[in-house]
Amino acid sequence: MDELDELIEAYDHYFRDVYIFVLSLSRNELIAEEITQETFYKAIKQIEQFRGDCKISVWLCQIAKNTYFTYIGKQRRFDPLQDQEGASGFNLEQKLIDQAEALNVHKVLHALNEPFKEVFMLRVFGELSFDHISQIFGRTESWARVTYHRARLKIQKLLMEDEQ
């Protein structure tokens, strides 16, 4: 079976999983369907870049996540006053409501190393469960929780340093 046959089989097998993943990010069925289709289109074009060092579902979800964030970036350029979704729960996320604070949080977030940055973004902006985050990385749910908690502590520490 060649790589293209594997991708066609993956489409049949993983379309629903990728769609549900994107739906959890976007909370919009039309956007989720469009991003999922775009994901598989990109996967076909980039199949030779798949190294096989992770599950194909993880690779597809990474493409979907990047495609979704690119889509959101383009939407913000057209509608800069678009409401920010995803800030909920505790003080750090509440700061995202204030645009000045949001810029500071994003600067600090940008400076974080992986996987802290991505786990934090998937949890806060993507509003994914720890279970879904663990599936994306092929790790345990505990790992996702600990990584998120550590990212949050790093961000809070860096924000406190910036205020001084």
Image: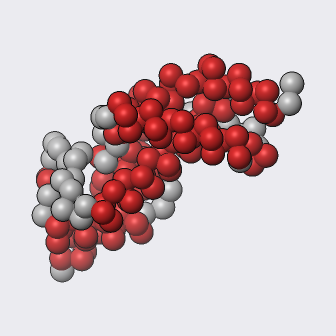
* Vertical side of 108 occupied by 85: above or below: above
Q: Position of residue 152 (x, y in %)?
A: 30, 53
- The residue at 35%/30% (across/down) is 29
User: How many numbered callouts?
Assistant: 0
Q: From this viewpoint, which residue is outermost toward the bottom?
A: 164
Which quadrant, please, contains the N terminus? Answer: top right
* Vertical side of 65 occupied by 141: above or below: above
Residue 56 in which image quadrant: top right
- The residue at 67%/37% (across/down) is 54
Front position in the image: 151 or 86: 86
Which quadrant, please, contains the C terminus? Answer: bottom left
Q: Position of residue 130 (x, y in %)?
A: 38, 33
27 left or right of 70 in image: left
Colour basis: secondary structure
- The residue at 13%/64% (across/down) is 98
Q: From this viewpoint, which residue is outermost toward the top?
A: 13
- The residue at 60%/31% (across/down) is 57
Q: Is residue 137 visible?
A: no
139 left or right of 27 in image: right
* Vertical side of 1 occupied by 163: above or below: below
Q: Position of residue 147 (x, y in %)?
A: 42, 45
Residue 51 in which image quadrant: top right
* Vertical side of 36 occupied by 81: above or below: below
Q: Is residue 163 visible?
A: yes
Q: Position of residue 62 (x, y in %)?
A: 55, 43
